[in-house]
Image (tube, rainbow, N blue to C red):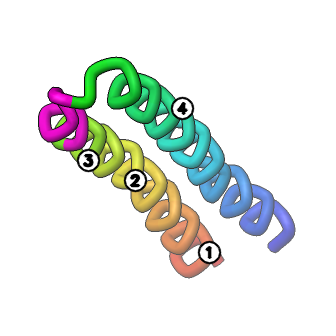
C-alpha cells in the first residue's frame, strides 16, 4: 500500500514542472510586452498556447496518480 502512495506522489509531482514552466513563460511574456507593446496580441496567443500545453502535462500527471491509487490496490 505504501508503494502505491509513493508512486502516486511521484506522478503528482508533474504539477511542479508545469507550475515552473507557466511561471517562466508568463515572466518572459511580460518582458516581451514591455519591450514591444504593439505585439501584445501575438505574444498573448503564444502564451496561452504554451500555458495550455504545460497545464496538460500537469493534468496527465494527476490522471496517472489517480490511476495508480485506484488500479494498483
Q: Which mark is residue 40?
A: none
Percent x, y of residue 65: 57, 65
Q: How many C-alpha atoms fall within 10 Å of the one at disc 1: few (<14), some, or many (≥20)?
A: some
Q: Earlier in the sequence, mark 4 or mark 2?
A: 4
Q: How far apart, in angstroms, are the residues tagged by discs 2 and 3?
A: 10 Å
Pointer 1 residue: 69
Q: For the residues labelled 1 and 2, say whether their Cβ atoms are less than 8 Å apart.
A: no
Taking the spot 63% from the left edge, 58% from the top edge, the residue there is 12
Pointer 2 residue: 55
Is residue 9 toward the left or the right of residue 61 in the image? right
Percent x, y of residue 4: 73, 66
* SS class, disc 1: helix
* SS class, disc 2: helix
Pointer 3 residue: 48
Pointer 4 residue: 24
Q: In this view, does 14 lie above or below 3?
A: above
Quadrant the N terminus occupies: bottom right
Residue stretch rendered in magenta on the structure: 38-44
Quadrant the C terminus occupies: bottom right
Q: Which of marks 1 and 4 is nearer the N terminus?
A: 4
Q: Earlier in the sequence, mark 1 or mark 2?
A: 2
Amino acid at each position: 500500500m505504501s508503494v502505491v502512495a509513493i508512486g502516486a506522489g511521484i506522478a503528482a509531482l508533474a504539477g511542479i514542472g508545469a507550475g515552473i514552466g507557466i511561471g517562466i513563460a508568463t515572466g518572459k511574456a511580460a518582458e516581451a510586452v514591455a519591450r514591444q507593446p504593439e505585439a501584445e496580441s501575438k505574444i498573448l496567443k503564444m502564451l496561452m498556447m504554451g500555458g495550455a500545453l504545460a497545464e496538460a502535462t500537469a493534468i496527465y500527471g494527476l490522471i496517472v496518480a489517480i490511476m495508480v491509487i485506484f488500479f494498483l490496490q
